[in-house]
Amino acid sequence: MLSSLSRLGFTFKRLLSLLSTPPKMAYNTEVLRCDPASISFDSASRPVISSQETSAALLRAAKLLNGKETVAFPTETVYGLGADALDAIASSKIYAAKGRPPDNPLIAHVSSHEMLQRLLPHSYAIPPVYEILMRHFWPGPLTLLFPTNHEVVPPLITANQPTVAIRMPSHPVARALIALADTAVAAPSANSSGRPSPTRAEHVLKDMNGKIALILDGGPCDVGLESTVVDGLHEDGNLRILRPGGITVEGIENALRAEMGDGETVPKVLVHRRDFRDEAMEQAPTTPGMKYRHYSPTVPVVLLRITAPPSSVQPQSVQAFVESIVSKRPHGKQMRIGLMVPSDSPLRARMTAFGGVEWVPYLLGRRSEPEVSAQRLFDGLLTLDNMGVDLIVVEAIKEEKEGLAFMNRVSKAAGETIWIDSSEV
Ligand code: AMP
Ligand code: MG
């Protein structure tokens, strides 16, 4: 046991040194179209593809993955940058292309339950609560932590931890690609580390052009932000949400209540930082965005909250806020400010009434549609950034359903939070 651990430790260090070497070759990045509607799956989870163009693109991508190269592809959450998760050299190219810190582990994506089993220790019995979650939410934006099979999963993927994060994506292009490559695919978001995650192929191309071999363009992503990461391996039987995401806490609680029999204890669903803290985990960093800056466009982001501020904070009037921004503009230059607000927010009319600023609104759906806000968040940050605005102002939404994940991402993207006097809006 000890000797095998030290062997793994050695391999891990060697791989870390590999990562610090910049990639020698610049790629001539190809973009190939895939039509998700042309892909279905048979009862053995094998893809059946009716479009020639899509089939050819997927086969080309699978061949690249099997040749240890990286490929960006759409998932239902965001575009992923994929490489063979069971090959350390291949996966090291993800870290190199993204500039990702080597202690940030990757999620392994599978296309079938049989592929899941290949990543787990041979004698491991999947806990009943995971069976429930997989039945309800797989394929889909839910990532589960499992004990890793050290003989199969390179320590690079898990950042040398005893667990491996696994999910089965529902996007037909993602699932078909993984099935055709016939290997688990590590696939973090296909962006430079620290930037907002891409939700369209154009976002990936702008950021990753020349750094990766191929981008599969399957249109915009439905969910728009990353998977929910769940750790259900604690002895108390409770589920810990390490990262809120596409599957809501409410959805998980409902599934558990619906499936657990009378007399069975329904596990609690604990959200990191809301219901529990874990300093060691934050240093690991097994909770994204804790140790490193995340989701930030190149221009500053300000988060506007209209709820009651903490006692130490004085809320501002809309006028004072706008004046404070305008006073910082370079002499003689009109400021362009991106304004990401729900379409039924009174804040939009209040803000845009002020002159001296060119306002560029980007609407987030109605206040009652947090799933639309979530789907549009990264697209809004990237679109406004590409339009060359000087600043992006985002209105906070309720931390319920998909709003929890929205606020998790935007809080990390924002350099500053301002509380607006609620009596004004
Ligand atoms: P992403 O950057 O979307 O690929 O998500 C990767 C994130 O999943 C990491 O930053 C971790 O927060 C989480 N994760 C991956 N593997 C593990 C693991 N073994 N233990 C805990 N969290 C993990
Ligand atoms: Mg990411």
Image (spheres, rainbow, N blue to C red):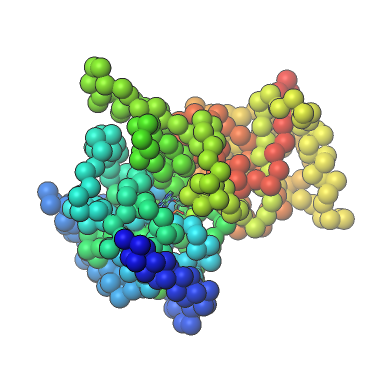
Whether residue 230 is situated above or below residue 11 in the rendered picture = above
Residue 31 found in image quarter? bottom left
Residue positioned most to the bottom: 24
Does residue 118 appear to the left or right of 420 in the view shown? left
Measured as percent of width and height from the top left, residue 298 is found at 65, 58
Does residue 181 appear to the left or right of 370 in the view shown? left
Residue positioned most to the left: 43
Residue positioned most to the front: 2
Residue 187 found in image quarter? bottom left
Measured as percent of width and height from the top left, residue 353 is found at 75, 34
Pick the quarter of the image with the C terminus: top right
Q: Nearer the viewer, residue 145 or 333?
A: 145
Does residue 23 appear to the left or right of 290 in the view shown? left
Whether residue 219 is situated above or below residue 346 in the rendered picture = below
Measured as percent of width and height from the top left, residue 313 is found at 76, 30
Q: Residue at x 66, y 25 (%)?
A: 307
Q: Residue at x 53, y 74 (%)?
A: 20
Whether residue 307 is situated above or below residue 67 in the rendered picture = above
Residue positioned most to the top: 262
Does residue 378 appear to the left or right of 264 in the view shown? right
Q: Is residue 371 visible?
A: no
Q: Residue at x 47, y 66 (%)?
A: 95
Pick the quarter of the image with the N terminus: bottom left
Q: Is residue 182 visible?
A: yes
Residue 158 found in image quarter? bottom left
Q: How many marks?
A: 0
